[in-house]
Amino acid sequence: MATACARHILVKSEKLAQELKAKLAKGADFAQLAKKHSSCSSAKRGGDLGEFKPGQMVKAFDNVVFKKAVLVVHGPIKTKFGYHLIETIYRS
């Protein structure tokens, strides 16, 4: 079965997610932005979610991690938790 490793930044507003994505595009450090802004408990690990399988995350999140390009920041992706910026580190 496929597995992936990803990190994300979870925020409440699409506007903030867009602002953070713009900062990332200009070279800001993903882990530092996650620690400062993410409301997920993964924030203390720089947004690192570790390794997981399809179905362990909500569908919209899985669709990005298992179908979109690796090492690219995708989003904002809206889920019931808020807005995510997602970067898949690897997929096997």
Image (spheres, helix red, strand yellow):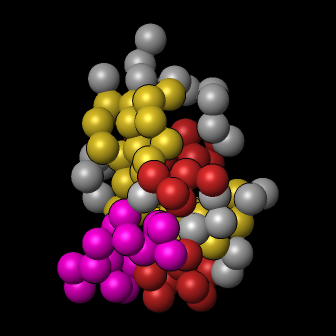
Q: Is residue 12 magenta?
A: no
Is residue 68 among what the camera can see?
A: no
- Which portion, as a residue range, is magenta? 21-36
Q: Position of residue 65 (x, y in %)?
A: 44, 42
Q: Of 28 and 68, which appears nearest the observer?
A: 28
Q: Residue furthest left?
A: 27
Q: How many marks?
A: 0
Residue 1 picture location, percent across and down: 44, 11
Q: Nearer the viewer, residue 88 or 67?
A: 88
Say left or right for 6 vs 27.
right
Q: Quadrant of residue 21?
A: bottom left
Instruction: Tell whether position 23 is magenta.
Output: yes
Instruction: Give the residue furthest to the top.
Output: 1
Which quarter of the rendered picture does the C terminus lie within? top left
Whole-percent x and y of residue 54?
Answer: 55, 26
Which residue shows up at 39% across the image and 36% down it? 5
Q: Residue 17 occupies which quadrant of the picture?
A: bottom right
Q: Nearer the viewer, residue 63 or 49?
A: 49
User: In x, y percent, where is residue 72?
Assistant: 29, 58
Instruction: Using the image, determine if residue 12 lies above or below residue 89.
Output: below
Q: In this image, 47 relative to 81: left or right?
A: left
Task: Give the residue at x 63% y 37%.
Answer: 57
